[in-house]
Amino acid sequence: MSGSFDPNVPFNQLPGLPPDADVENRAILKAVIRAREQLAVLDTSCRLIPNPEIITSTIPLREAKASTEIENIVTTNDELFRADHGIDSAPTPEAKEALRYNTALHEGRKSLLTRPLSARTAIDVCSVLQNAPVDVRATPGTYIGDGRSEVRRYTPPSGPETIRRHLSAWERFIYSDHDLDPLVLMALTHYQFEAVHPFPDGNGRTGRILNILLLIQEGLLELPVLYLSGVIVRHKNEYYDRLLSVTTDQDWEGWILFMLRAVEEAARETAELIDTLQAHQEATALRIRDLLPTSPAKELAELLVTLPYVRIRDIETADLAKRQTASHWLTTLAGAGLLEEARSDGRQKVFINRDALRILT
């Protein structure tokens, strides 16, 4: 264990980056190659989709659900998609939290168009997550551990000036002359951000959004569609154990390899998901052509995947048909079993693409 670390004392002397370790040894570089190969496959899958909105409007919702679940904020896929599409007038608090994650991810991506990833980005992302302006922690007493027994595993740096100093160093390291592969850079900066734990709440979700934004900024992702939090949910205990092992034993290799495997696994699963969605969309278009020969089958099929909960007005908004025609189309597709007719809590008709939802969930 590091001589300067005591889980009961604020880790104000948290070592800066780069660490005093070989963070690009043979095992790590081999894992980097595997992860990059899967990211390239994912990128190809994204580029082959004629309408990227199909994935940018749906896959980040899965990431939002998983990332909030890591923080024990649990919602169902049905609740989340209904809330996102405005089907429920009063979404659950958990669904609202997950949707804020989705909003923060997309707004963070847009911010990269005007300024690079920074401590300011982290503050803005966390503010969206919290639905209120946030700043670094000013109140002492924050620790990570068992809240019931009050057994502490880690106490992050304390005091606004100390936290700001660590955040500034974190930001400077990203743009320093480190010559690291972006995936290794992501692993290092994610640990450091979580160790600084700068905000009163939302640090884990903020950090996971920053991972995606960094990969976009570094050119390894074009769209925010890497389902990384889903992998972390499955390996949640190891995720937290690996973070702590860096602090206690300087086990950077174990942590970096864990994150690289997570990226590889997430990229593979996301690419497979996209391919399955694309195949479903094409099959749906063929069925629509048979059932509604005069309809714009390709565009309608795209809409039914982009909006698994679809209403008559959604077809009107997409400028595909007027109300009466749109109603006829949806009723026909429901009668043929392609959609399921239901009602929102506002009592308007809603048509559910259950096959698309099964693929997404």
Image (cartoon, rainbow, N blue to C red):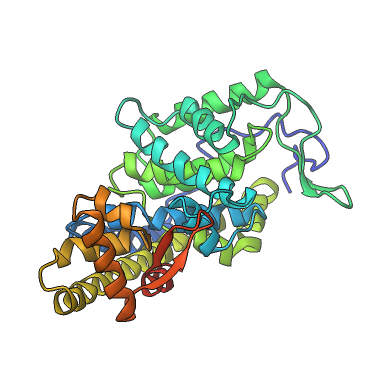
Q: Nearer the viewer, residue 284 or 70?
A: 284
x and y percentages locating residue 265 in the rendered image:
42, 66
Taking the view exactly as shown, the residue that stands out farthest to the right is 149
Task: Please give the name of the residue rendered at 13% of the width and 63% of the height, measured from the top-left corner.
Answer: 296
Q: Is residue 57 left or right of residue 5?
A: left
Asked which quadrant contains residue 110, the reply is top left
Q: Is residue 266 visible?
A: yes
- Relative to 233, residue 223 above or below: above
Residue 192 left/right relative to 9: left
Between 243 and 73, which is closer to the camera in this rendering?
Answer: 73
Q: Nearer the viewer, residue 176 or 295?
A: 295
Q: Residue furthest front?
A: 324
Q: How many numbered markers are drawn?
A: 0
Report the residue at 47% width, 63% height from top.
343
**Outermost residue to the left:** 294
Q: Is 81 drawn above or below residue 4 in the view shown? A: below
Residue 295, x across and y down, in percent = 14, 66
**How far across and how far down the image is residue 253, in percent?**
53, 55
Question: Which residue appears at 66% of the width and 34% of the height?
Answer: 14
The image shows residue 252, relative to residue 165, as above or below, that is below
Q: Is 73 situated left or right of 291 in this image?
A: right
Q: Is residue 256 visible?
A: no
Residue pictured at 39% horizontal, 58% vertical: 59
Q: Position of residue 124 (x, y in %)?
A: 50, 29
Q: Residue 309: which quarter of the image?
A: bottom left
Extreme-top residue of the structure: 161
